[in-house]
Amino acid sequence: MALYVPPAFAAGDRSLALALIDEHPFATLVTPAGAEPQVTHLPLLRDGDVLLGHVARANPHWRSFAEADSLAVFAGPHAYVSPTWYAAPKAAVPTWNFTAVHVHGRIAVIDDARERADVVDRLVARFEGAGEDAWRFALTGREREAMLGAIVAFRMPIGRLEAKLKLSQNRGADDRARVAAALARSDDAQAQATAGWMRRTGAFDDDR
């Protein structure tokens, strides 16, 4: 499974791809094993060059982890781009700007109960935050064991990493500035975030 990445849209800097994973951790996990690929949508937490996560034990997906490399797809900000934003709109067509990262790796199931609980605790801490009212996995005894027994935690080493940041880099500087300005003016949060990534990646560095 390969991602089509024209040279103009390649991330170049690996840190940009890792930042997108950290900021948009809800992924589509695909394992191409068995009669048909297994697909699960879930949050994944990056720990250096490893992704951590868990699925329900009732989900058959985890039984395919050892059979083939899996693919985790992270989708970042994206937005429609109108030709009317270009200097010569009649000579252009609509398109879509977007950011995405594909991670390939062989998943290993975590059998140790303490490590499994640690994955749960770290995911909770990441998304609950550190506030006084933040929820924590505080069950003890058999109730805790039952809850943890109902999931399968795993590690996915980041093997091959592909990033596609399609942010109007194939247009001239003036058109890129026009696109970023139009997206930034939008009421849509995704469009505004896409404009932010255009500035962040250097696809657009004008402050108009």
Image (cartoon, rainbow, N blue to C red):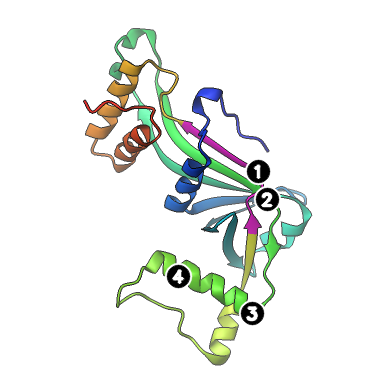
User: In the figure, 180 relative to 42: above or below?
Assistant: above
Counting residues from the start of the chain, the first of labels 3 and 1 encountered is 3
Report the residue marked by disc 2: 105
> In the rendered structure, which amino acid carries the disc numbered 3?
Ala
Residue 154: % across, % down: 64, 64
Q: Dot 3: within a 10 Å radius of its alpha carbon, few (fewer than 14), some, or many (20 or more) residues? A: few
Q: Are marks 3 and 2 in contact (CB under 8 Å)?
A: no
Q: Is residue 178 left or right of residue 116?
A: left
Q: Quadrant of the C terminus?
A: top left
Q: Is residue 103 left or right of residue 9?
A: right
> In the rendered structure, which amino acid carries the disc numbered 2?
Gly
Q: Dot 1: within a 10 Å radius of its alpha carbon, few (fewer than 14), some, or many (20 or more) residues? A: few
Cα distance in 3D space between marks 3 and 2: 23 Å
Report the residue marked by disc 3: 113
Label placed on residue 124: 4
Cα distance in 3D space between marks 4 and 3: 17 Å
Cα distance in 3D space between marks 4 and 1: 27 Å
Magenta-tinted stretch: 156-165
> In the rendered structure, which amino acid carries the disc numbered 1?
Arg
Label placed on residue 160: 1
| Residue at the (56%, 24%) spot, across then down | 6
Q: Are marks 1 and 2 in contact (CB under 8 Å)?
A: yes
